[in-house]
Amino acid sequence: MLVEATKTLVEQTTDKIIAFIKTHDLKIGNKLPNEYQLSQELDIGRSTLREAVRVLVSRNILEVRQGSGTFISDKRGIATDPLGFSLIKDQDKMILDLFELRYLLEPKMAALAAKNASEEQIQRITYLKDEIEISFLEGTDDHVQLDIELHTTIAQASGNVGLTHIIPVINESIALFNKSYNVERLKRETITLHSDIVEAISNHDELEAFDTMTVHMATNRKEFRKIMKKK
């Protein structure tokens, strides 16, 4: 009670909104009630509600779409740079270190996805895999964001909440590699490896998903180490 008493009215209101989201089991993309309805539901003034919503938008929990309303953000409350990657001077070492981290985490993540993925999630990762290949073939940069979405969706399919929140952060930093180093051979290998990973998950083959994701991570790491030796 003492902690609650020290919070401002706006902070108490943000807590109420988060509690409302949890109580009503609102998911990413779901719309909150309009301002009048929500203020009545939470028994708070509309000006306080607006300020609390602004705070939650800044925390990537909510998203306001002009003319449409307020929605649960797909950023899951994750800060843009929660681990301070942008402040690391040696970006190449950071990329290599994160490849090491991905090598440890993502094979198990793929195996869990093969075990737990829903048909809807399998359809989504298949779609993203195909779109990445199209981006490679057409020479666009769309594959960078699509690759982040693919690995994020696999993380979600794993059913592990921790991975769901950690992997997008790692993927955002690995995007530096995709944007900085255009390796044609790696693109061709990625198309093949993505197909193998998605097939394994679709078949709910946990061991194959683990092995193919291990090869994918090892291939990326090996290629980047080659680039570093030439610099």
Image: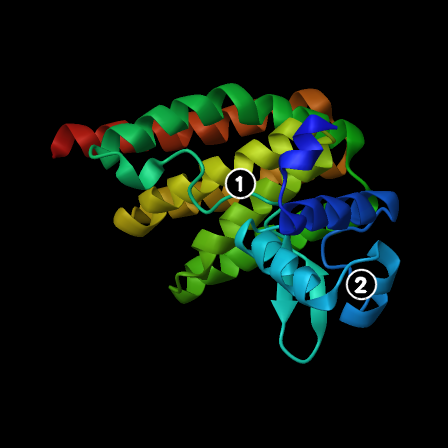
Q: Is residue 205 something one can see in this rendering?
A: yes
Which residue has dot 2 on it?
A: 39
Label number found at residue 66: none
Residue 200 appears anywhere in the view: no
Is 170 in front, or is 3? 3
| Nearer to us: label 1 or label 2 | 2
Q: Position of residue 90 (x, y in %)?
A: 21, 32
Q: Which mark is residue 168?
A: 1
Q: Position of residue 105 (x, y in %)?
A: 54, 23
Q: Amino acid at mark 2?
A: Ser
- Relative to residue 34, is residue 165 drawn left or right? left
Label 1 Cα crowd, 10 Å radius (few <14 / some 14-19 / many 20+):
many
Looking at marks 1 and 2 on the same chain, the residue that comes earlier in the sequence is marked by 2
Q: Is residue 41 left or right of residue 4?
A: right
The relative height of residue 125 versus residue 221 in the rendered view (above or below) is below
What's under tag 1, amino acid-wise?
A: Pro
